[in-house]
Image: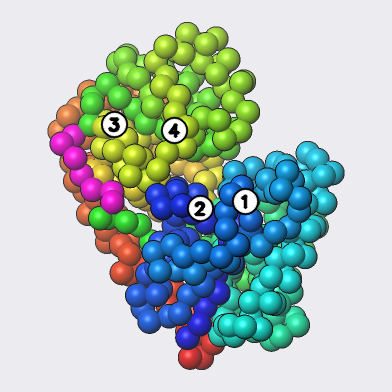
Amino acid sequence: MRALLLTHNYPRFDGDPVGSFVHRLAVLLAGQGIDVRVMAPAGPDLPAEGTLDGIRVSRFRYAPKRMETLAYTGTMASQVRGSWKAKLAMAAFLAQGYRAVARLLSQWPADVLHAQWWFPGGLIARAVHARTGLPYVVTMHGSDIRLAGTVPGGVSLFRRVGRSASALTTVSQWLKREAVRMDPEARPTVAPMPVAPDLFFPGQGGDPHRLLFVGKLTDQKGLHHLLRALPLMSRAATVDVVGAGRVDDTAIRRLAADLGVAHRINWLPMVSQRALADLYRSAAIHVIPAIHEGLGLTAVESLLCETPVVAFDSGGLPDIVVPEKTGLLVPAGDSRALAAAIDRVLADAALRKRLGRDGRRFALEQFGPEAAAQRYATILRDATGV
């Protein structure tokens, strides 16, 4: 069986964290005997054709180079909302993405399309299906579900994409509920992305004075809640913030200074997967104060490193953070409760060790690569009848 994966996020080089879970899925599907190729957009200095870990990757141009900024940065939605040039680039993205897929299919006939995110990949897949009848599967990761509910006509467009698909999947129970809320006819399957236990493995135990935050510095990811929690804590701790510079972080840095905690923050850019694994192992706690997170795959990676998670009880995070088993959950938006939970885990080495040990076991059981690969291989084969 041949499967073409459509995505706007895919690793640009070996070790690139951007879209690493999509690449991991592609490699695992190939291990299931499926012939996999990937279609992704162009980006700075990226070849039109390439191979990564045996997976052929084609990248399509959609605008002049200076305007090809929609992909790989994690800021596609905000760019399109805030700029007419970005809106034009988005329209070109959809048109050129469709043409690129059509050209590839004329040379390499696929049996099924697998779109990551219903927008924009799912929209392209639906257009190809309307023209050719080729079946497609859509996997929703979170940002696309939030997008559907916040833009004019988004829910209607989401329904059109979903109702033509052979199968819908979501990476968490919360996303499944959100998808059904927007389209009562939807019947999505919960199928998380695979993790990499060979890369994310335990260390010797993290520094009991060190916290970790990973993600874009947007309001949704919630770093401001952690910054407000720091002065409320009884125990001093520093925070490695991974993801600085991906969006304008002037305001969040100013907040750290205003709260008197700037000296406790280590601002780091987005790092490779291997470097991120080292940071997980170096921290006592991975703090995820996000609201409406699709799943929180970084929480799974952290647990694989036996680093417990303290997070908000929001979105898909409860699928991963099981209270008193893999970490602690606190009410969303409550910085005081967040501070108390972090203090509790920092103060109790035995608790940290137990949460880390049980967390890795849970992560392997629920998100192990073999189970994820078999699940998605079955979904794709069911879509085609192959």
Q: Is residue 37 above or below residue 151?
A: below
Q: Main secondary structure of the magenta part?
A: loop
Q: Nearer the viewer, residue 178 or 52?
A: 52
* Measured Cα–Cα span from mark 1 to mark 2: 8 Å
Q: If you read the primary sequence from the N terminus, does the residue marked by circle 3 or circle 2 appear first?
A: 2
As drawn, the label of residue 242 is 4
Q: Nearer the viewer, residue 266 or 334?
A: 266
Q: Is residue 180 above or below residue 245?
A: below
At 66% across and 62% down in the image, what residue appears?
60
As drawn, the label of residue 141 is none
Closest to the camera, between mark 3 and mark 1, is 1
Closest to the camera, between mark 3 and mark 2, is 2
Q: If you read the primary sequence from the N terminus, does the residue marked by circle 1 or circle 2 appear first?
A: 2
Q: Are marks 1 and 2 in contact (CB under 8 Å)?
A: yes
* Measured Cα–Cα span from mark 4 to mark 3: 12 Å
- What type is the residue that disc 4 sits on? Val
* Measured Cα–Cα span from mark 3 to mark 1: 33 Å
Secondary structure beneath dot 3 equals strand
